[in-house]
Image (tube, rainbow, N blue to C red):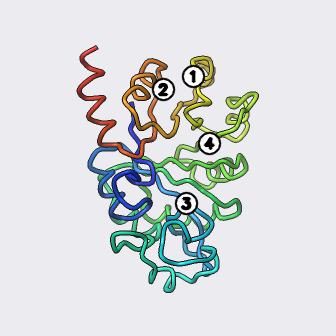
Amino acid sequence: MLIIGHRGAGALEPENTLRALRRGMACADLVEVDVRLTKDGIPVAIHDATVDRTTDGTGPVKGYIIEDLKELDAGEGETIPTLREILDIIQGQTGLVVEIKEPGTEAIVASVLMDLMPEQLFLVSFHPGSVATAKRLLPGAKAGLIYSQETPDPVDLARSAQADLILPRWDRLSHGVVEQAHDAGLLVVPWTLNAEDEFEEAARLGVDGFASDDPCAARRYLQESIPAR
C-alpha cells in the first residue's frame, strides 16, 4: 500500500516546503505538493490562492513575481519552493504527486516536469479537464481525479477524464467504490488519513494507498501492525 506524504509532511513541518518534503521523503513512497503559478508564470508549491495563511505575506500568489515571492517566510525560515527545486531534491529518491490547482496551467507545469521527470509521477486535480489534459501532455505519468463532494459515479467521471486513479476524500470512500474502481482498472488513493483506526480501515477496504499529513506515523503503523495480522 502506497503512502503519500500530504503537502510533504504537513503535520510535522511547514506544508509544501522543502523541509516538509525532505521529512516526508524519509517515510513516504511519494510526496504530494499543490502547484500554482506566480505572476511571471513560475510553478510553485502552495495550496491556497493567497499567501496569507502559510506565509508572512498577503495577497494572491498570482500577484507576485518569483523574486518577491521568495522573500516571504513560509515557516521555520523556509521559502515557497518552485517546482524545479522540488524535482531537484526528490530525483531518484521518491515519487511525486503534483496537484494542479488552476485549470489552464497544465502545459507550463508539464513543461517543467518533462525536464526532470520522476520515475513515479502522479498528476492529480479536482478538475476533470485538467486531469485529461495532464494525461495527454505526460502520458507516462499516472493521472488522478480528486473529489470531496458526493459524486454519483466517480469511477465513470474518472474514466471519462482518462484517469488512472481516483482520490476520494476519506469520508466519501466505501467498499463499493473501491470494488467498482478496481473493476474498472483504477487505483484508489483516499485522503487525508492521520489516525491508526483510519489506517486500519484503509487496509481492510483494500485501497492502493493513501495520503497522510504524518507519513512517518503511517509507515510505522503499516510496518508494525498490518504484517502481524
Label 1 or label 3, whichever lies nearer to me, is: 3
Give the residue at mark 4: 146
Q: Looking at the figure, which quarter contains the C terminus? A: top left
Instruction: Assign a secondary structure to mark 4.
Output: strand
Q: Amino acid at mark 1?
A: Val
Q: Amino acid at mark 3?
A: His
* Amino acid under disc 4: Ile
Pinpoint residue 34: horizontal percent, then vertical percent. 53, 58
Q: Depth check: 3 or 194 in front?
A: 194
Gap between marks 2 and 4 measured at Cα: 15 Å
Estimate the spatial distance between the alpha carbons at disc 3 and disc 4, rounded to whole Å.
14 Å
The answer to whether residue 130 is left or right of residue 53 is right
Whether pointer 1 and pointer 2 mark residues with C-beta atoms closer than 8 Å, the reply is yes
Q: Identify which residue, 158 or 117, lies in the foreground.
A: 158
At numbered mark 2, what does the secondary structure look like: helix, strand or loop?
loop
Q: Quadrant of the N terminus?
A: top left
* Nearer the camera: disc 2 or disc 3: 3
User: Circle 2 sits on which residue?
Assistant: 207
Is the residue 206 above or below the residue 127 in the image?
Answer: above
In the structure shown, which secondary structural element does the residue marked by tag 3 occupy? loop
Q: Which mark is residue 178?
A: 1
The residue at which mark 3 appears reads as: 47
Dot 4: within a 10 Å radius of its alpha carbon, few (fewer than 14), some, or many (20 or more) residues?
many
* Alpha carbon separation for disc pair 1 and 2: 7 Å
Q: Spatial distance from mark 1 to mark 4, Cα to Cα?
A: 14 Å
- Please state which of the two labelled residues, at mark 3 or mark 4, is closer to the viewer: 3
Q: Say which quarter of the image contains residue 174.
A: top right
Q: What residue is at 60 percent from the left and 70 percent from the top?
A: 50
